[in-house]
Image (spheres, rainbow, N blue to C red):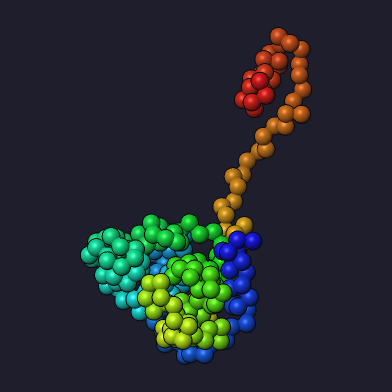
């Protein structure tokens, strides 16, 4: 099992037993109140609006003047990773760019089960914590699944540092209490577009072979060529 699949399973298990250790209901209400703006981006990217909301909170404390990608002002070229993005015409345009064109390319993500959604959020911040075998504060800060440990700057991990921002999991829990329509039920298979409907292709074994030279034989010959038999 690869790291991402293993992490999705582990994050799903953590979610089932998580308990909040920090009060975040006021933040959750603020995020839910902005649902229409998040939904406008969700429609263009396929990323659930609640996921967009918690990323916005983590990256910029829900500042509408800051980009979803890294918290830099969206009306100028970004200097933090991902650098060189923008300027954009609006917060929404910057958000679409962040989800479609920047790693981890959230708009391409298929697994919107809760374990998959939390793993996408963890990848948004990086898999350095997963490689260390510790819960990511980006996801779990403010819950009993996280105690300490934080990258205080690029490549520098302090096991004693504590992330004071609320993590995405606790925010999602609080948002779901306010808005029960928020759910994460679709796994990788469910998230894939359904196959096209229509009559099944004819089975090669079921095609009868009329006498050679007849109109029926010519038709069968044409069908078999289309199917790649001849």
Pick the front one: 79 or 227:
79
- Position of residue 188 relative to residue 36, above or below, is above
| Image x and y of residue 82, in percent | 34, 63
Residue 43 appears in the rendering:
no
| Image x and y of residue 75, in percent | 23, 66
Q: Is residue 193 left or right of residue 53?
A: right
| Image x and y of residue 41, in percent | 39, 63
Q: Quadrant of the N terminus?
A: bottom right
| Image x and y of residue 105, in percent | 44, 59
- Position of residue 17 relative to residue 53, above or below, is below
Q: Residue at x 38, y 72 (%)?
A: 154
Q: Which residue is drawn at 29% across and 70% down?
A: 72
Q: Which residue is drawn at 61% across and 66% down?
A: 6
Residue 46 appears in the rendering:
yes
Q: Residue furthest top?
A: 213
Question: Residue 215 sits in which quadrant?
Answer: top right
Q: Is residue 35 left or right of residue 75?
A: right
Q: In which quarter of the image is the C terminus?
A: top right
Question: Residue 214 sits in which quadrant?
Answer: top right
């Amino acid at each position: 099992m690869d790291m991402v699949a293993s992490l999705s399973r582990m994050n799903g298990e953590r979610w089932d037993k998580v308990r909040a250790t920090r009060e975040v209901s006021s933040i959750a209400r603020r995020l839910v109140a902005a649902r229409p703006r998040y939904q406008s981006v969700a429609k263009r990217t396929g990323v659930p609006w609640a996921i967009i909301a918690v990323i916005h909170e983590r990256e910029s404390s829900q500042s509408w003047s800051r980009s979803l990608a890294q918290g830099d002002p969206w009306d100028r070229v970004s200097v933090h990773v991902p650098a060189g993005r923008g300027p954009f015409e609006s917060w929404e345009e910057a958000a679409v760019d962040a989800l479609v064109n920047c790693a981890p390319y959230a708009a391409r993500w298929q697994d919107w089960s809760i374990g998959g959604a939390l793993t996408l959020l963890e990848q948004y911040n990086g898999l350095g914590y997963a490689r260390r075998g510790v819960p990511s504060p980006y996801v779990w800060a403010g819950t009993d699944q996280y105690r300490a440990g934080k990258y205080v700057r690029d490549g520098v991990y302090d096991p004693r540092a504590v992330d004071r921002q609320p993590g995405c999991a606790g925010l999602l829990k609080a948002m779901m209490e306010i808005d029960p329509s928020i759910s994460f039920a679709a796994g990788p298979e469910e998230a894939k577009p359904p196959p096209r409907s229509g009559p099944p292709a004819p089975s090669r074994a079921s095609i009868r072979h009329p006498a050679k030279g007849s109109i029926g034989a010519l038709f069968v010959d044409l069908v078999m060529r289309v199917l790649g038999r001849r």
